[in-house]
Image (cartoon, helix red, strand yellow):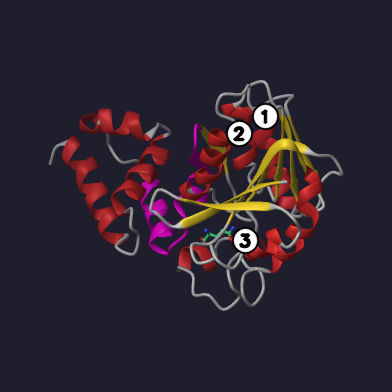
């Protein structure tokens, strides 16, 4: 067998082990690229010359036990940036890019937000994507988790040096108002059945929000208004089945709310103005 056959055969065999994953082939490619210390793009361009290194098999075994690829490789792409991730921090999801799209739409035709707040920043994904989108802005990322703060601070230093502050806190924020407030709170109902790779590996504190999944919106609704500057907007992620249940909590506090859908057409983002 040629060396090219070796790499292709190794990818095929790995992808076959990942039948539980909707992205089995991509998972295998990302793990092989990681084992080789190259990007996936480089791997695909040089597949004919690649020999799978001995360490690849151990990565395949980890993924076969449903460990998320992002925790194995330590990185995840989001919007225009690549974030470091680690166990203890929610892995950024493409769904959450809906919040950045909503913000881009809100600030279209303006110089953009100058100040950005990310409540429950996790890896720093939403804050740092927004700071990449608006290079003249600065911002603050708040989280209650010490592990999240450590990862977000590392990402902030690398991706937005001097422009991002990461701090410990809760839904009450910093006491200041911001042009753009981003928030992906926990919103999964306590009894919800999640895939093994989420339930067994990702932090429960970033996922679950009481019996109906609305507990954190109830708290956030009360504190959010004063944190949005005049002309500003808050983009808050919701679960696909919360487009009816979440908005009234914020409207009850005198805020204006519209619901925006993600690329799959599911309700995903509350667009909230004072
Ligand atoms: N979208 C995530 C999931 O169901 C939930 C993230 C969250 O609760 N903020 O895997």
86 versus 41 height, above or below: below
Above or below 29: residue 19 = below
- Which of the two labelled residues, at mark 3 and mark 2, occupies the earlier sequence position? 2
> Given contact means CB atoms under 8 Å apart, are the residues at marks 1 and 2 in contact?
yes
Does the magenta segment cover residue 116?
no
Question: Mark 2 — residue?
Answer: 130
Q: Position of residue 68 (x, y in %)?
A: 47, 56
Circle nearer the N terminus (1, 3): 1
The residue indicated by pointer 3 is: 247
Q: What kind of element bears circle 1?
A: loop
Q: Which residue is located at x 63 percent, y 26 percent? A: 112
Q: Is 121 in front, or is 199?
A: 121
Q: Secondary structure at mark 3?
A: helix
* Mark 1 neighbour density, 10 Å: few (under 14) some (14–19) many (20 or more): many
Q: Residues within 10 Å of mark 3 (few under 14, many from 20)?
A: many
At 71% from the left and 51% from the top, the residue drawn is 147
The CA distance from mark 1 to mark 3 is 24 Å
- The quadrant where ligand 1 appears is bottom right
Residue 202 x, y percent position in the rendering: 57, 60
As drawn, 146 above or below 197: above
Q: Residue furthest right?
A: 175
Q: Residue furthest left?
A: 1
Q: Nearer the viewer, mark 1 or mark 2?
A: 1
In the picture, measured across the screen, residue 200 lies left or right of residue 206, that is: left
Query: Disc count in the image?
Result: 3
Q: Secondary structure at mark 2?
A: helix
Q: Nearer the viewer, residue 144 or 228?
A: 228
Magenta stretch: give its range: 55-80
Q: Residue at x 74, y 54 (%)?
A: 145
Q: Quadrant of the N terminus?
A: top left
In the picture of the structure, the residue carrying the numbered disc 1 is 113
């Amino acid at each position: 067998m040629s060396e090219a056959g070796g790499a292709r055969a190794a990818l095929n065999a790995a992808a076959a082990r990942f039948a539980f994953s909707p992205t089995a082939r991509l998972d295998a490619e990302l793990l092989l690229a990681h084992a080789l210390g190259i990007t996936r793009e480089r791997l695909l361009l040089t597949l004919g010359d690649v020999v799978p290194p001995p360490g690849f098999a151990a990565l395949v075994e980890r993924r076969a036990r449903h460990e998320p690829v992002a925790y194995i490789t330590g990185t995840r792409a989001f919007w225009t940036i690549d974030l470091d991730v680690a166990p203890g921090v929610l892995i950024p999801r493409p769904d959450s890019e809906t919040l950045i799209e909503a913000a881009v739409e809100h600030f279209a035709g303006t110089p953009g937000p100058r100040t950005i707040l990310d409540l429950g920043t996790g890896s720093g994904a939403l804050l740092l994507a927004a700071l990449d989108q608006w290079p003249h802005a600065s911002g603050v990322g708040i989280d209650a988790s010490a592990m999240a703060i450590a990862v977000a601070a590392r990402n902030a230093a690398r991706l937005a040096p001097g422009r991002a502050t990461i701090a410990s806190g809760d839904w009450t924020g910093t006491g200041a108002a911001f042009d753009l407030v981003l928030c992906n709170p926990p919103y999964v109902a306590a009894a919800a059945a999640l895939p093994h790779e989420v339930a067994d590996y990702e932090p429960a504190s970033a996922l679950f929000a009481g019996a109906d999944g609305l507990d954190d919106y109830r708290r956030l609704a009360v504190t959010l208004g004063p944190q949005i500057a005049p002309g500003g907007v808050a983009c808050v992620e919701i679960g696909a089945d919360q487009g009816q249940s979440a908005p009234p909590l914020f409207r009850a506090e005198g805020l204006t709310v519209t619901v925006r859908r993600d690329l799959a057409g599911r309700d995903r983002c509350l667009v909230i103005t004072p």
